[in-house]
Image: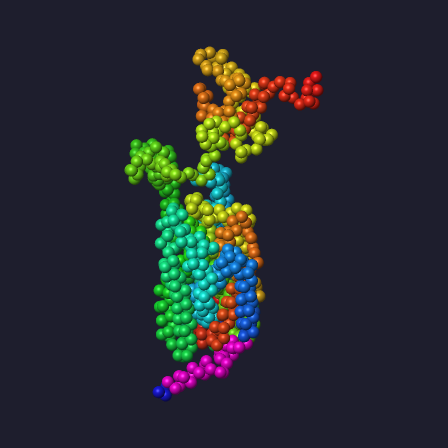
Amino acid sequence: MSDPTTSPQEAAPLHGILAEYDNPTALVLASRKVRDAGFSRWDTYTPFPIHGIDKAMGIKMTILPWIVMCAALIGLGTAVWLQWWTNAVNYPWIISGKPFWSWPANVPIWFELTVLFSAFASLAGMLVLNNLPQPSHPLDLKERFARASDDRFFLLIQASDPKFDEADIRQLLAETTPVFIEDVAEDRVTSDKIPRALIYVGVLAAFASLVPFAFFAKARNATTETGRFQLVWDMDFSPAYKPQETNPLFEDKRATRQTPAGTVAQGELRADDHLYLGKTKAGTFVSAMPKGLTVDADMMALGKAQFGIYCAPCHGLLGDGNGMVHKRAETLGGGWVPPSNLHQEYIRQMPAGQLFDTITNGVRNMPSYAAQIEPEERWAIILYVRALQKSQGASVADLSEADRAQLK
Amino acid sequence: MASDEKKTKKSTGAEGSSVPKLPNGDSIRLGKEADGLRKAALGVGIVALAGAVLLGGGPYGKQFQHSYLTAYMWGLSIAVGAVWWVAVQHLFGARWSIVVRRVGELLAQLVVVMAVLALPLLIPIFMGNDVLYPWAEHHYFEHHAYIASKAPWFSPAFFAVRMAFYFGFWVLLAKYYLGQSRRQDTTSGDVALTKKLQSVSAPGMILFAVSVTFCAIDFLMTLDPVWFSTIFGVYYFATCVLTFNSTLALTLMWLQSRGHLKASVTAEHYHDIGKMMFAFTCFWTYIGFSQFMLIWYANIPEETHWFNDRFFGSWLNATYFLSVAHFFIPFFGMMSRWMKRNTGRLRFWALYILAICWFDMYWLVAPNLHKDGVALTAADFLAWIGIAGILVSSALTRARDVNLVATGDPRLSKSLAFENI
């Protein structure tokens, strides 16, 4: 179709006019002129960054920082959301006794993702804002232009500029001090097709990226005689010692270490014998409530609730030893030792400390309740038991005047 | 002989009666014009310190000693930050900073007055008075057997050696930088001097890291002899860089308001100083949080008790306030270049950072005295004003007869023409 006597490049339309300078100052001065003439589609090319060229060219401040800021916030949000959702919502798992969502442990990831997203956005934003990558450019065909990466400074005004007028521009550029002015034609030589090699590499890379998934699929669906493939051995089989294991490092070979003599864990010092044992220093049972506890309606309510949960099943809601467990045991028959009736005289006379000791350590076939009931709750139960005992063995004399009057 | 004569003539020409100026016409000599301010600052400083002593229970009073330590560490951070800053400019062969480097060299001279101002803290220690440091009492480690292995570190002789090393090293380095830089002014820009200063700065930087780390440990961390944090020195170093760069910016603004360096120091230089302030705001947070997170995660009582002191009652509010006011506000406030390139806006941030860094020092020191909650007292502020007043006066005295620009630096013109991209 094209004329056989001229190559496609010779017939190519004008891309722009190029001026060449041999020093940066000349380029800066020329840039100011071109800027003041009101051109918009033009650029300069230099072997190194020249301070002040942005101003000379009238380039506005880049919007890249705002793009990076948005990316940073997205990165931060992603990190916060992902860690919160995985740790606190989807797979809650207590680690070192800390809350499900222990945010301080997540801060390094917040920081990393903020920086990562910012870095990607900086690179991608820079490329997009600079119209990069450009596989080819008309200037690549100019032999002289190779010196743009060595010792020459270039200015190109594109023909697509709305103010483009060939004669005017030639005159304008001639007024600056160029070494050379020449026309730059559009590129009609370089193919606009993607190179074959690049396509092959792309296809190969796409397939290669599927290889790990193929292994996953095989591992999930095939049977094997060698056992599971452990990618990260330590994750599946923690090298940490488990309770009751032997550890050759220590003389006594115990992996579970005893607390050093004379020490106690934080918050576990139980020096108050009255509160924690129900005994005096001499070892006799106390009959008063511990000093630290206030005997009030709240304590009574706590005692009633705890009694209902732990005691009533055997001892009965009234404390008369006729609870549901007892009734069921009676119907089943066999050697059942009945739970004590708490209203028996010897239990009425029992010091509070001994009741405490019974709940703590158990008696006969009643087991220890120390693991289920906190010491303060045990005292509350004792308070409630005392109230029960009073209610079942009260006489008219115990009532107030008004109540007695009402009774009549 | 003849060349010698010429040299003397030339040097007297530069340093003598005629007011030195830069080729761009800028005045670079303070002279007597700031004498009034110098005296006023000294007066205010001494009166404020006296007030702090009176209100703080005397020179050995608990309140005074804690208030004074807070203010002292704040002031020391400016001086020590200056020494570091000058060293780092030489080490990297920085060109942007040459026009402002002399001001940094002069501010570094404050380590001399800070060495003297350390005496009110050191004397009680050597007297065995545990008003500030519990370990200063001679029998402390006998009663605290579980940390007895630390006792050699606290022996008075070793302590004295360390103090001599910190202040001796800083004073030597600061005087060396200023002296050599002034020598370059009179030797018509000897390039060999620039190279020598660079090669001295490398070992100097290593020794500096050691000195500032252990100084912070000795003055601040040992308030609680049980506690330890290996990152603590870096935490204090972050404060040094922040307070120094803020002071540098404010000093340059003041000099320009008095008609000096008017054309030489431009928005480009302020921009770079502002960048340092911004960067080290992030750095401080990074270090402070790293310190917190590792201790929080490991959850070992001998480490956590230090944060425990700061995480309950009104100290918890102070801790929240510190993280918001020392990080979030300046981070978002100073991020834009628009903030750093305008003198008025940068002045606000410089004052802000100086204030918040003081509060950081308060947060480090005061919980050791006021366990029950934040208690800002008049002595705290008076000691702060006192130290600041003495520093201003001392800096003005030192700068009076010295060129405010290193005119002999062979790369000065590059710094004058410096532009950020």
Residue B71 drawn above or below residue B417:
above
Residue sitting at the far front: A282
Q: In which quarter of the image is residue B178?
A: bottom left
The residue that appears at 56% across and 53% down in the rendered structure is B375
- At x 41%, y 84%, the residue is B8
Give the answer, above or below, for where A188 lies relative to A117: below
Say whether residue B21 is magenta.
yes
* Residue in the foreground of this view, choosing between A367 and A274: A274
Residue B331 image offset from top left, x and y in percent: 52, 56
- Frontmost residue, B206 versus A140: B206
| Residue A345 horizontal/vertical position (percent) | 53, 18
Q: Is residue A360 visible?
A: no
In the rendered image, residue A349 lying in the magenta stretch gets the answer no
Location of residue A406 by image quarter? top right
Is A312 left or right of A146, judged from the image as shown? Answer: right
* Quarter of the figure that contains the C terminus of chain A: top right
Quadrant housing the N terminus of chain A: bottom left
Name above or below for residue B53 compared with residue A317: below
Residue sitting at 36 percent across and 50 percent down? B149
Asked if one can make out residue B407 in the rendered structure from this viewpoint, the answer is yes
**What's the image's color scheme?**
rainbow
Find residue A91 and report its horizontal and vertical position in percent: 47, 37
Find the magenta span and give its range: B4-33
Where residue B150 sits: x, y (%)? 37, 51
Does residue A391 lie above or below A256 as drawn? Answer: above
